[in-house]
Image (cartoon, rainbow, N blue to C red):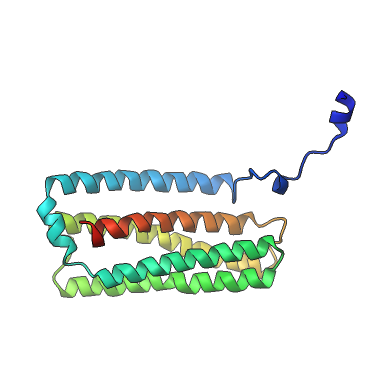
Amino acid sequence: MLAAAAVTPPAPAGESGRRIPGSKGIWVGITCEFVEFVVLFAVYFIARAHFPDAFHAGAERLSVPAGTVITLLMVTSSWCIACSVNAMRCGNRRGATLWLVAGLVVALGYPVTKVLEISWNLAQGIDGSSGIFFTVYYYLTFNHLVHASWGILGMFWVLARLLAGGYDAADHDGLEALGSYWHATDIIWLVIFPLFYVLA
């Protein structure tokens, strides 16, 4: 019985059903990202508890359409990246490439929309010195934009690797890592949006 066990080949990683997508490194990065934003959200709730009127009045001055557009862009881009990963798992390199390009194009709409929103804010006299609500708002949303920008740069890198034949159905950890990071960044925005644009 022991001899039989010794010669039994191990199950492939993809068949275990418990493999973590991407790489350990990206999950360390995602954990650090979540820890950073947990601290920032704690600052948000502490400030809101001390200045509830300022937070209520500040939220009414923000552009809800801009926040809604960013939310739709993030969710749609995440869906495209997920479709790219799924296509590559099925060995469909062309489909994976097209979905990744779609995800990248949609994701680029986020910084464009954010710049337009900030321009609108400044035209309304809303800047970081406009009160505690806007100080917290700019700090949190700028931090998220930085993380999203890293994700967009990652999309360019993964797309270049994909076009160069660097991934296939058996080995596409880089694409999975990108998807994991972008989904994490998307989740954080889905918390930011209601806190500033809806519930404050």
> Is 131 positioned to the left or the right of 172 in the image?
left
Q: Position of residue 85 (x, y in %)?
A: 61, 61
The residue located at (28%, 72%) in the rendering is: 65
Q: Among all residues in the image, which is located at the extreme top?
A: 2
**Residue 160, image x, y percentages:** 61, 68
Task: Count how many numbered circles sit on residues in the image.
Answer: 0
Residue 195 in the image: state x and y as whole percent: 26, 55
- The picture places residue 50, in percent across and down from the top left corner, at 13, 45
Residue 194, located in which quarter of the rendered image? Answer: bottom left
Pick the quarter of the image with the C terminus.
bottom left
Query: Is residue 143 or residue 73 the one in the foreground?
Result: 73
The residue at 33%/56% (across/down) is: 143
Tell me which corner region of the image, top left, top right, bottom left or bottom right, holds residue 115. bottom left
Q: What residue is at 16 percent from the left and 45 percent from the top? A: 49
On the picture, is 90 further left or further right than 157?
Answer: right
Q: In which quarter of the view is residue 132 placed?
A: bottom left
Q: Is residue 67 above or below residue 22?
A: below
Q: Nearer the viewer, residue 200 or 126?
A: 200
Identify which residue is drawn at 70% across, 49% down.
14
- Residue 186 lies, with reference to residue 108, above or below; the image says above
Q: Is residue 167 visible?
A: no
* Camera sees residue 94: yes
Q: Quadrant of the N terminus?
A: top right
- Say above or below: 117 vs 132: below
